[in-house]
Amino acid sequence: MSARLLHLSDTHLLADAGLHQGAVDTTAALGDVLAGLAGLGDLDAVVVSGDVSEDGTPASYAAVRALVEGFARPRGAAVVWAVGNHDVRAPFAAGLLDRPGHDPDEPVDVVVDAGGLRVVSLDTSVPGAGYGELRPAQLERLADLLRGAAPRGTVVVHHHPVLPAPTVLHEALRLQRPHELLDVVRGTDVRVLLSGHYHHPYVAALDGVTAVVAPAVANRTDVLVTAGRERAVRGSGACVVDLADDGTVRVTVLTVPRPGDGEVVVDLDEEAVRGIAAAAGVPAR
């Protein structure tokens, strides 16, 4: 039985419709993206692969939940959330998963049954940092889970991608030891890995598993910027992921036009990039 998912990422909402990077009303952007996708029919799941909030406030999580669940409900879709490096675990768990009192030192991992399609959300965040990693215990739990196949297969969601980074800054903030996750999913019923973080779409086949990086709702990374710099422009999008009965994975990247698309919202020189990488990247060992 085939499955269809809407893959959103990097919504970066703030309390009281605050402006991301002082420029983008991400609450309005998410509303516009969902309105632009109104023609989508039934879905098995709507996945939001991290950086759901920019400021980690309960108000931002309440706003994004209302918008996404309001879109998913009439389409019969489960909603799956993943923690990103800008999210804050305790309010994320309370506001999106109805899990008050979550220990902020523990990852927020979730397993959702979407009509026989198993969707596993793994928390790759490192509190206080921008890079990602998976703890050995998380990988062990995933391996145990995947020893039994799901009726319609498995989808794994995690904010930091296993794919190479598109810019110097994202390279400093990428997932550490991505091969460990690939080693766990290889040869299992995992059909696709869904991620965000890069604010730019990528799709690649790795060891028989398709890895998808969704475009962001908040803005778009300019991957043609001079090496060492970092630039983001206005632009929002999403992916539709179709999982066919014959094993085929089809990914459709969708751009939802909004006023001002292409305007620069972030433009960092090499010194600024080095400073962010030093503060939020992997500490020197």
Image (cartoon, rainbow, N blue to C red):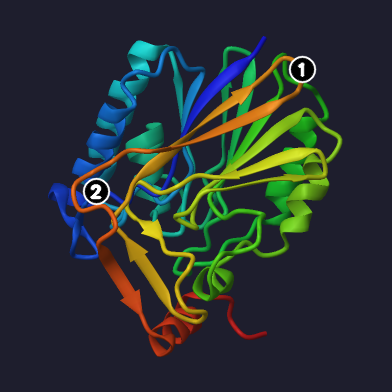
Q: Residue pushed farthest bottom?
A: 271
Q: Position of residue 113 (x, y in %)?
A: 58, 20
Disc 2: which residue = 26
Which disc is residue 246 wearing? Answer: 1
Q: Is residue 201 above or below residue 209?
A: below
Write the residue at 34% across / 26% down.
37
Q: CA distance from mark 1 to mark 2?
A: 38 Å
Task: Establish if 1 lies above or below 164.
Answer: above
Position of residue 268 relative to residue 148, above or below, is below
Q: Earlier in the sequence, mark 1 or mark 2?
A: 2
Q: Are marks 1 and 2 in contact (CB under 8 Å)?
A: no
Dot 2 alpha-carbon crowd within 10 angstroms: few under 14, some 14 to 19, many 20 or more: many
Q: Determine the image quadrant of residue 4.
A: top right
Quarter in which the C terminus is drawn: bottom right
Between 24 and 275, the one lying in front of the other is 24
* Crowd band around label 1 with a 10 angstrom C-alpha radius: few (<14), some (14–19), many (20+): few
Q: Element at badge 2?
A: helix
Q: Amino acid at mark 2?
A: Thr
At horizontal 77% and vertical 17% (from top left) the residue drawn is 246
Q: Residue at x 38, y 56 (%)?
A: 220
